Amino acid sequence: MRKDRLYLLTFVSIAVIFLIIASFSIKHFVKASANQLIEIQLESSKREADEISKLTYYQISNGIDRQKIIDNIQDVIENTDNGTSFICVFDWSGKEVCNPDITKLGQKVNSDQSLLTSLNEENSSDQLYDLLLGERKENDSIPTNDLKTEIVYIAPVQESDLIVAAQINLDKVRGQVRKLKTSFYTIFLLMGGLIILSSFIVVRIIGSYYEKQLEQKNTDLESELINLSKLNTDLIAYQQRLVNNANEEVIETNESSIDLATDSSKKRILTYIRNELVPVSINQIAYIYTENSITYVICFDGKRSTSNVSLDDMLMNLDPSVFFRANRQFIISISAIAKIIKYGNSQLKILIHNADVEIIISKNKASEFRQWLNI
């Protein structure tokens, strides 16, 4: 249940993040693409207006009648206002003399002068794009919704009162922008769906992988705990067996040291407390350790004495079923072990009864220690 809820929250989080990013970026993409489209249309309209202006001037300079020139232009541009852009001609009084819609002939030119001025400056496409979106200034004389066409460029004809104007069909351009928006939203939705779905699948795959890894670690840990529990059980059983057979066991030794008691059963060793020789019963020894080349013998009652014998020589005279060489520094008695704890990477930590000491058995020694407990 927790996993399903986690995956659901992951899915929702990715979707929300994508929607937030898309909501900011899609406006920029749409506007940038629309600007490029408008710039192309503006350049085409300007070039057409300039060519007609030059052609009209050429005809006037060759003595062709003004009215005939106007009639020829009218025949050429008639019914061309169905496209995105078209050409019209008006005189200096502002009356249209040529227009694709013959019903507008003789009427005053309906144009936004502020827009026309801005289009002759930089960022003209941005200005026209804002116009198409209805972002007009409050002091504009003509509402955006009332405009069907707009003059975006004028090219006066030399040596005449005629002005060639390039007009944009706003309804057509708005339609193109709407199609552009629809295409972008469709692409973003499809792309977003694929990204969210693929991200969800990847998160689930990665999550499943790490869950398996975690389960494997938990399994290994449980196995280690079981082994450790068995080890402590074996320790307790062995300690009990030693207690029950304490009166029947005989400690044997083949070698002697000048500092060890030399009787046949080796029940005691000689140690020092300052300058005093002190015999210590072997069954009273909890552990033996060396520090600064001095060997210390620690009894169960906490008494500590020293010896000049090294740990290697000391171990040769101790019962191997009772004493174990834990590491280079310690020899421990089976009866002194209070608890065995897993430590580090397959290492063991030995806790001693009534002693603030921790003895570490290395990974290599751990298997030998387990076998020793099972003697």
Image: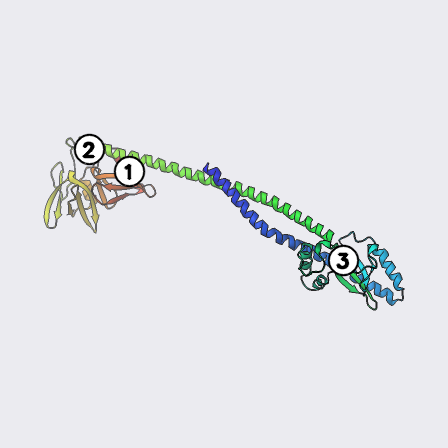
Give the secondary structure at mark 1.
helix
Total labels drawn: 3
State whether residue 149 appears in this view.
yes
Mark 1 = which residue?
Answer: 368
Which quadrant, please, contains the C terminus? top left
Q: By what rule are the colours in the image chosen? A: rainbow
Task: Specify whether 141 is left or right of 253.
Answer: right
Q: Which numbered disc, 1 or 3, marks the residue that appears first in the sequence?
A: 3
Task: Estimate the spatial distance between the alpha carbons at disc 1 and disc 2, rounded to whole Å.
Answer: 19 Å
Q: Give me the residue at 57% from left, 47% from top.
A: 19
Q: Give me the residue at 18% from left, 33% from top.
A: 243
Between 93 and 76, the one nearer to me in the picture: 93
Give the secondary structure at mark 2.
helix
Whole-percent x, y for residue 139 in the image: 68, 61
Observer-side mark, 3 or 2, equals 3
Observer-side mark, 1 or 3, equals 3
Q: Residues within 10 Å of mark 3 (few under 14, many from 20)?
A: many
Task: Estimate the spatial distance between the alpha carbons at disc 3 and disc 2, rounded to whole Å.
Answer: 111 Å
Establish if 109 lies above or below 23: below
Task: Specify whether 253 is left or right of 109.
Answer: left
Quarter of the image where one finds residue 234: top left
Question: What type is the residue that disc 3 sits on?
Answer: Gln
Question: What type is the residue that disc 2 sits on?
Answer: Leu
Residue found farthest to the left: 276
Task: Specify whether 251 is left or right of 87.
Answer: left
Quarter of the image where one finds residue 37: bottom right
Mark 3 = which residue?
Answer: 167
Indicate which disc residue 242 carries.
2
